[in-house]
Image: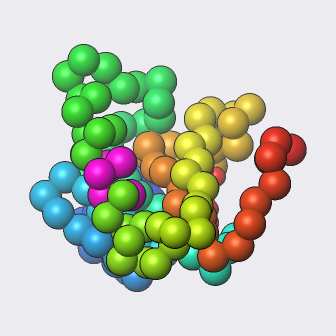
């Protein structure tokens, strides 16, 4: 039994506002947006975090960034710029243990982000 929230979103057992989908990747709106654009991009296959990327599954990362490149255009944040964030583990602030990338846009962000 898989209790992963994002696997349930992939399966359609938990509803989400989908922005993009293909056979390997799903992008949907974050339930608690922190910016005018806040989309989560996830592999459909369950990978817990960056710690679990390996020779067998790493191809998905390039594909996810290709999807992010396309989303930036369709969401019209390409010209102004945007931020892509991955949180890994406790110190990284990861709260959902299914690999995901945050795409933030529509405002300007500070650096460093602390
Ligand atoms: P993390 O802190 O793990 O990097 O990010 C997890 C993100 O998932 C948070 O921004 C949180 O708002 C979002 N999130 C958690 N549960 C749900 C949900 O059920 N649906 C959606 N759309 N987003 C969720
Ligand atoms: Zn999962």
Q: Residue at x 31, y 20 (%)?
A: 54
Q: For residue 66: magenta?
A: yes
- Of all residues, the one furthest to the top in this rendering is 55
Q: Position of residue 47 (x, y in %)?
A: 36, 37
Span colored in magenta: 64-68
How many numbered discs, if any?
Answer: 0
In the image, 69: left or right of 91?
left
The image's colour scheme reads rainbow
Q: Residue at x 55, y 51 (%)?
A: 84
Q: Residue at x 59, y 35 (%)?
A: 88
- Of all residues, the one furthest to the front in this rendering is 79
Q: Position of residue 50 (x, y in %)?
A: 47, 30
In the image, 4: left or right of 23?
right
Residue 90, located in which quarter of the rendered image?
A: top right
Q: Position of residue 69 (x, y in %)?
A: 36, 58
**Does residue 110 sit above or below 104 in this rendering?**
above
Which quarter of the rendered picture does the C terminus lie within?
top right
**Does residue 38 sit above or below 6 in this rendering?**
below
**Does residue 67 sit above or below 79 in this rendering?**
above
Q: Residue at x 36, y 48 (%)?
A: 65
- Of all residues, the one furthest to the left in this rendering is 23
């Amino acid at each position: 039994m898989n209790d992963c929230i994002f696997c349930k979103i992939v399966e359609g057992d938990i509803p989400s506002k989908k922005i993009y989908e293909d056979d390997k990747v799903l992008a949907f709106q974050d339930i608690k947006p922190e910016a005018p654009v806040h989309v989560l991009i996830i592999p459909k296959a369950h990978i817990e975090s960056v710690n679990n990327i390996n020779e067998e599954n790493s191809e998905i990362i390039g594909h996810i960034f290709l999807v992010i490149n396309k989303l930036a255009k369709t969401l019209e944040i390409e010209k102004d710029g945007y931020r892509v964030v991955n949180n890994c583990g406790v110190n990284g602030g990861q709260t959902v243990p299914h690999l995901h990338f945050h795409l933030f846009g529509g405002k300007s962000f500070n650096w460093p982000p602390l």
